[in-house]
Image (spheres, helix red, strand yellow):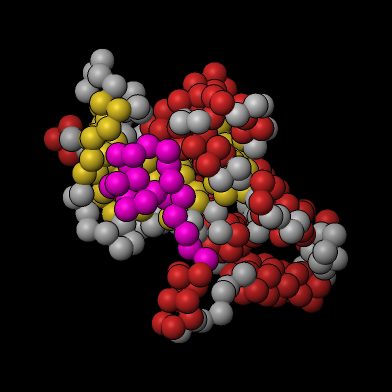
Amino acid sequence: MGSLKSLECEYPIIDSDFQNFCASHGIFSVEDILIHDLYMLVAFAEQQSTSERLKQGITQILSIIDGQHQPWLNGMELLEDAQQNKQVLSTGCEGIDMLLQGGLCVGHLTELVGPSSSGKTQICLKVASGVATRYMGGVVFIDTGNSFSPLRIAHFINQIPDTIFKENILEKVMSQILCHSVFDIFAMLDVVHQLEYSLRSQVQTGADQVRLLIVDSISSLITPILGGSGSHGRALMISAGFLLKKLAHEHNLAVVVTNHMVGGEGGILKPALGESWKSIPHVRLLLSRDPGSSICHMSILKHSYMASGRAARFMI
């Protein structure tokens, strides 16, 4: 939904006066409205000389939010949607594909959780190369820590059977992978909104179709905004999570995000971002790797239709 300023062209009522009024109460985006006391905001608006216009602006934003809600679907409609639209993308790693019964679910948000050096980024690079090669589909890679390695992707592409015998395959595959370097949550949201606009405005088929979105890592963007006692950071985190899920569902993408681990009670490691984030991903996969080893261990923490606890070992 984005900043209030971005809505001004389409909704003239959300003009600079309305934006300045909202800014005076710490409101700069639609997400800020969601966590604000609306009764208090309306009360403040009534104290202004332009109270009616300000209240119309508030009503307009609530209408925009309400318009984002999807219509109710019955069980048969959901089943048909799952059967017709929600395919599985091979990750290019046999061990992961066996664990996930085929690969990444299109329309789902999959989270890779693991400590530093557990192989999260390597798996993201391998999945990006595998999807771009096997499906000749677009891959958007949001890099938050300068971890994107085109050389590593080229290595993975050349390992895929038969690709070394095809002329210009490396150039074709690499051109399908778009990397965006971002260093804060707002820059990431801008990229995602741009992608959403692009997907809505274009009819994409074949090689032009975006099949995969990767955010490596989402926790490095969200952790800095979670400090303090305010709820703004948590609301922004949840908004980002639901935006990624909405993008995956509406445009038939597989979305993968990575999350680091932090110390919990008794020094036991646990996924970062806390309980509020825990319920957002459709799939949570725990990754680990022995020091100095290329063997990774992956287990299912959460899955929409598989039992947790399933595990696999593979080389990356």
- Which residue is at a point 50% across and 31% down the rendered structure image? 162
Q: Measured from the top left, where is residue 245 in percent x and y?
A: 50, 57
Q: Nearer the viewer, residue 58 or 170?
A: 170
Question: Taking 47 as reference, is 261 left or right?
Answer: left
Q: In which quarter of the image is residue 150?
A: top right
Q: Which portion, as a residue range, is magenta?
A: 85-104
Q: In this view, does 64 lie above or below 91?
A: below
Q: Is residue 209 above or below residue 64?
A: above
Q: Is residue 86 above or below residue 72?
A: above
Question: Taking 245 as reference, is 104 left or right?
Answer: left
Q: Measured from the top left, where is residue 160 in percent x and y?
A: 47, 30
Residue 66 visible: yes
Question: Taking 254 as reference, is 100 left or right?
Answer: left
Residue 103 within the magenta-colored segment of the rendering: yes
- Which residue is at a point 22% across and 54% down the rendered structure image? 308
Residue extending farthest to the left is 266
Q: Quadrant of residue 56?
A: bottom right
Q: In this view, does 189 lie above or below 279?
A: above
Residue 24 visible: no
- Which residue is at a point 23% across and 40% down the rendered structure image? 312
- Which residue is at a point 34% across and 39% down the rendered structure image? 94
Q: Which of 51 and 86 is in front in this view?
A: 86
Residue 195 within the magenta-colored segment of the rendering: no
Quadrant for the C terminus, please: top left
Q: Measured from the top left, where is residue 288 in percent x and y?
A: 26, 31
Q: Nearer the viewer, residue 4 or 19?
A: 4
Q: Which of 270 and 228 is in front in this view?
A: 270
Quadrant for the N terminus, please: bottom right
